[in-house]
Amino acid sequence: MSRELILASASPRRRRLLKQIGLKFRVIPSDVNEDQVFHHDPLENVQAIALSKARNVAARVKRGIVIGADTQVLADGDVLGKPDAPEDAVLMLSKLNGRTHRVVTGTALVDAETGLEETWVETTLVTFRELSEDEIRSYVGTGEPMGKAGAYGIQGRAAAFVERIEGCYFNVVGLPLAKLVQKLRKFLV
């Protein structure tokens, strides 16, 4: 890949995923306030946030392909963002307990030089097994749920909660890798 890739995210999970598949990139976190981007449709919202992040960084670098992403958890029509406090995490995990929910990641690519843009949404269904209140509270006590959409990290201790997934596992971690590589081909020719 001859063009520079730039990840518009400070997420260590997204960095690890890109490194895992051998991509060379640099990190320039966007300074977009995600709370100021809002659409009533959650699928449009994650794409709009991802695009805002990628555009924000693209305007600063002038060259390179910028990757922006936003992941949210949807359960019963509610968007479960990142918990503000441990009790928020307990409530979110209780809502997911023994049920299937959707994890959606909006991803955007922006060519800083040409202005070419593309966005898409990847959806993965995740089913949690039945959890006891002690399991939920114990997990929350580790601090792992904080800073994660839906209050869990599938790549961490919450892996023991997941009974089944349908779709891209890496999407649940924060970046749909197969689709990303497929879309990047258009930008890197």
Image: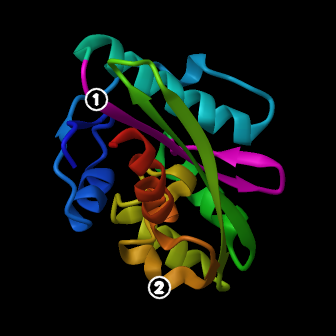
Mark 2 neighbour class, 10 Å CA radius: few under 14, some 14 to 19, many 20 or more? few
Residue 58 drawn at (x, y percent): 34, 19
Magenta segment range?
Answer: 63-83
The location of residue 180, given as percent across then percent down, is 45, 54
Label 2 vs label 1, nearer the camera? 1
Q: Quick one: 21 or 97, which is closer to the camera?
A: 21
Q: Amino acid at mark 1?
A: Pro
Tell whether label 1 touches label 2 (CB within 8 Å): no
Q: According to the image, label 2 marks what residue?
A: 160
> Circle 2 — which element?
helix
Q: Where 77 sits versus 29, above or below?
A: below
Give the number of the disc on residue 29. 1
The spot of residue 40 in percent (x, y) is 80, 29
| Residue 92 within the segment the image draws in magenta | no
| Nearer to the camera, 1 or 47 | 1
Above or below 181: residue 31: above
Q: Main secondary structure of the magenta part?
A: strand
At 38% from the left edge and 72% from the top edge, which residue is drawn? Answer: 155
What residue is drawn where x is 32% and y is 33%?
65
